[in-house]
Image (cartoon, rainbow, N blue to C red):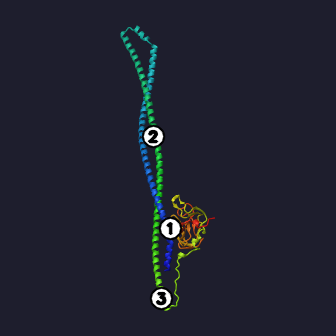
Amino acid sequence: MFRALIVLALSCLLSPAFADERAQTQQQLDATRQDIAELKKMLGQLQQEKSGVQKDLRSTETDIGKLEKQVEALQQELKKTQGELERLDHEKKKLQSARVEQQRLIAIQARSAYQNGREEYLKLLLNQQNPEKFARTLTYYDYLSQARLEQLRSFNETLRQLANVEQDINLQQAQLLAQQGNLDAQRQELEKVRAERQQVLAKLNNDVKARDQKLQAREQDQADLSKVLKTIEETLARQAREAEAARQKALLAAQEAEKQRQREALAANNDAPSKPRAIPGPLVSSSGETFGGAFSSARGKLPWPVNGRLLARFGETRGGDSRAKWDGVMISASPGSQVRAVHGGRVVFADWLRGAGLLVILDHGNGYLSLYGHNQSLLKSAGDVVKAGEAISTVGDSGGQDSSGLYFAIRQQGRPSDPAQWCRAQG
């Protein structure tokens, strides 16, 4: 019977701790679910923005492809035109040679004509005795004159063709250079746009990757929290069943003891009326145990578990998230510094817990608990009884902390209580 009452009392003591942990875990789980929903929404927006950038990049690269095709066609045209320019240049050189030759011939004929003038022609008219010879001579002079005129016309035509060829060459060169410059400018602009969009796309890809990794981490945290919450709920349900069974067993035992006492009293009264009646003593359970005095009377008198500077105070916003508040304090301390119990009690938890790292929980009786988290090592195990000031762990940064420090919290009947109201002002 006495053992059953002890089990019942221990269950009553541990249930607030598990209930408080369940409430905190549920709160963290709700916050994680909200974060996951926000991350998914942000990922959707990033994917939509990424899709738009990809669409723009596709359009730009398609335009660049078309422009490259035009540039290639222009290059082919330039090659053809270059060949035509070379042909025209060759023709120009031939015309220039012909012009030089024609100038030479014309110069010779001009000198001959100038030297002879019309003297030989007049002499021929005055001195010619043979009519046939005279006629042939005239015909010869006519041929010479016509040849000179034809050479002059050919020379003039050569000059005209040479001028046209030079004009065509200059015009084609100017047009091709203008086209090439225009295409080069368009290509440079499109290349610039493509580079900018590729940079935006690369940044979006990095953002999506980072958000996706964060989302996966959050989802893993959610899964872990769900497991912890399920374990706590199962433990609480089991404790409730065990407590009820113990209570029923204790009640039956008390009833049976009372019946037995009445039977013995009745028999004693019948056999020996003068015999004094035995009165049973009060039942005592471990719930009444105290270590170093009542915890409730130590408000404002407790020492701090470590010496250090308060990094976070009770009730302050946690991690920049307005939805999360500190339910304890964070104390900065050197790694390996000893953490001491602020009051005598019994270790009810000494293990790693997600979000708190290596954690020690002390039961001080009457529903009072103290918590010490993010330790480097644990010096006590569950079930150990410790005295006030006894070392129970060492300071560390377990549980994902950026720097070493101690998480310290006090629970009163499962509710967080400000440690600063319980501990003495730090020196």
Percent position of residue 396, x then y: 56, 64
The residue drawn where x is 48% and y is 46% is: 196
Residues at marks 2 and 1, CA–CA distance in whole angstroms:
68 Å
The residue drawn where x is 48% and y is 80% is: 1
Percent position of residue 323, x then y: 50, 60
Asked which quadrant contains residue 334, the reply is: bottom right
Marks 2 and 3 in Cβ contact (< 8 Å): no
Asked which quadrant contains residue 335, the reply is: bottom right
Q: Secondary structure at mark 1?
A: helix
Percent position of residue 375, x then y: 55, 66
Labels 2 and 1: the sequence-earlier one: 1
Viewer-nearest of discs 1 and 3: 3
Q: Secondary structure at mark 3?
A: helix
- For label 2, the residue is 186
Residue at the extreme left: 132
Using the image as rendered, state which of residue 308 and residue 299 is in the foreground: 299
- For the residue marked with disc 2, what is the amino acid? Gln
Residue at the extreme bottom: 271
| Image disc number at residue 266 | 3
Quarter of the figure with the C terminus:
bottom right
